[in-house]
C-alpha cells in the first residue's frame, strides 16, 4: 500500500461522517480504477449539470474525453470548476430501525478545474488511458484514431490534488435498545457487479474467435458501477 | 406502457446524441426505480458538488433525505437549483476502432429546485418512499422513526417535470471500411449487478431466520448501480 496520503483542502475535507473518510491515496486509486464511469458535475447558467462519462487515470491525472461539440466538455475545457464523483455501491445495510438503514459504498470526489490537453502526445496518452480503463487491451487491438477523429475529440485533464474518499463497510449500527428488543432482522445484502458472456458483433466473419483481452475481462469479478 | 411522454425544456432537451433520447415516462420511471443511488449535483460557492445519495419516487415526485446538518442538503432545501442523475451501465461496447468504443447505458437526468417538505404526513410518505426504494419491506418490518430521529432528518421533494432519459443499447456502430477490413473483434461485454447472500448481523439472537422481504430481494436480478 502506498503511504502517500490525500491532502485535503477545506472543500475536500469531509464534514459529515468524517469517520468514513479515507486518506490513503492507494485506496483512492483503487476506487477510481475499478469503476467504469464517473459523474461529471459542472455549473451551466448558474445551475448544476451532472452527466455520466467514462474516464481514465494516469498517475495523479484523471483524463476525460468527449466530442468537441459537447457543451459540457466546452464549459469544462474553458476552465470552469468541475466535480468528478465515482461511486461503488457495495451493499444495502438493513438495520433494526428505519433511521439506521444505510448503504455500504466507496465514493471518490474530485474537485478542480480541468485543463484542455493540447499537446499531441499527451492527447494520445489521455485517450489511451480512457480506452484502456474501459476496455483493457483495446488500444493495442483496435484501429487507432485518425487525424479527423482526433480533431473531433476534446481531451481534458483533471489533477487529483483535491480529492476525497468516503467508505462505509460492515454491519448495521443499531441503537442498543433496538438490539436488545429483538424481533427485527438486521444485516447486509451485498451487491456486486459482474461482466457477462461477450456478445460478438453480427458483422464479424463466421468463425471469429473472441480475443484474449476480451475473454479475460469477462472473468474479472470487479465492482464496476 | 404509459403513453405519457416527457415534456422537455431547453435544458432537458438532449443536444448531443439526440437519437438516444427516450420520451416515454414509463422508461424514465423504470430507470429510476431500478437504481439504488442517484448523484445529486449542487452549486456551492460557485463550484459544482456531486454526491451519491439514496432516493425514492412517488408518482412524479423524487424524494431525497439526509441529516439536517448536511451542508448539501441545506443548500438544496433553500431552493438552490439541483440536478439529480441516475445511471445504469449495461455493457462495454468494443468497436473495431478506438473512436467508436462506447458504453451501453441508461441515464436519467432531472433538473429543478427541491422543496423542503414540512408537512408531517408528506415527510413520512417521503421517508417511506426512500426506505422502500432501498430496502423494500423495511418500512413494515423495522422500527419507525422517533420524534427525535424525525427532527434530525430533512426530507426534500423534487418534481420530475424537467427530466430526460438517454439510452444506448445494441452492438457497436463501426465505419464500413473497418468492418470490411476485418481482423479486429467487435461486440458487447454486458455488465450486470446482482444481490448476494444476506449477511445477518452478528448481534441477532442465535437461530434467527432471514425474513421473506430480504430473501426475496436477494433473488431479484436487477441492474442496480
Image (cartoon, coloured by chain):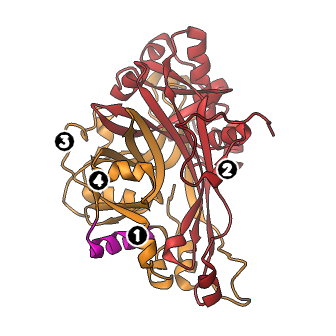
Chain colours: A red, B orange
Q: Which mark identifies residue B114?
A: 4
Q: Which residues are magenta?
A: B118-133
Q: Nearer the viewer, mark 2 or mark 1?
A: 1
Pointer 2 with pointer 1, Cβ within 8 A: no
Residue B130 part of the magenta segment: yes
User: To which quarter of the image does residue A57 belong?
Assistant: top right
Image depth: mark 1 or mark 3 in front? 1
Q: Residue at x 30, y 50 (%)?
A: B78
SS of the residue under disc 2: loop
**Label 1–label 4 contact, CB within 8 A:** no
User: What residue do we see at 73% from left, 39% from top?
Assistant: A26
Per the image, label 3 sits on a secondary structure element best described as loop
Sequence order check, earlier mark of 1 and 4: 4
Q: Which residue is mark 2?
A: A222
Residue A101 versus residue A151: which sits nearer the camera? A101
Q: Position of residue B49 (x, y in %)?
A: 44, 40
Nearest to the observer: residue B216 or residue A186: A186
Dot in front, 4 or 2: 4
Q: Nearer the viewer, mark 1 or mark 4?
A: 1
Residue B137 lies in magenta, yes or no?
no
What secondary structure is marked by label 1?
helix
Q: Is residue A32 above or below residue A142?
A: below
* Residue B151 marker: 1
Amino acid at each position: 500500500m502506498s503511504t502517500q496520503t490525500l491532502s485535503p483542502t477545506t472543500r475536500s475535507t469531509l464534514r459529515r461522517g468524517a469517520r468514513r473518510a479515507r486518506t490513503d491515496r492507494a485506496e483512492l486509486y483503487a476506487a477510481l480504477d475499478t469503476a467504469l464511469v464517473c459523474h461529471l458535475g459542472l455549473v451551466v447558467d448558474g445551475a448544476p449539470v451532472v452527466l455520466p462519462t467514462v474516464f481514465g487515470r494516469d498517475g495523479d491525472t484523471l483524463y476525460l474525453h468527449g466530442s468537441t461539440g459537447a457543451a459540457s466538455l466546452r464549459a469544462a475545457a474553458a476552465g470552469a470548476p468541475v466535480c468528478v464523483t465515482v461511486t461503488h455501491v457495495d451493499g444495502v445495510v438493513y438495520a433494526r430501525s428505519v433511521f439506521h438503514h444505510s448503504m455500504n459504498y466507496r465514493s471518490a470526489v474530485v474537485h478542480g478545474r480541468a485543463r484542455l490537453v493540447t499537446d499531441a502526445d499527451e492527447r494520445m496518452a489521455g485517450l489511451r488511458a480512457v480506452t484502456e480503463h474501459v476496455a483493457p487491451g483495446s488500444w493495442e487491438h483496435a484501429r487507432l484514431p485518425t487525424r479527423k477523429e482526433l480533431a473531433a475529440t476534446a481531451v481534458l485533464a483533471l489533477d487529483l490534488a483535491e480529492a476525497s474518499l468516503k467508505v462505509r463497510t460492515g454491519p448495521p449500527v443499531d441503537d442498543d435498545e433496538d438490539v436488545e428488543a429483538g424481533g427485527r432482522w438486521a444485516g447486509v445484502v451485498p451487491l456486486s457487479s459482474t461482466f457477462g458472456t461477450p456478445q460478438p458483433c453480427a458483422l464479424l466473419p463466421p468463425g471469429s474467435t473472441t480475443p484474449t483481452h476480451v475473454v479475460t475481462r469477462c472473468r474479472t469479478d470487479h465492482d464496476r458501477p
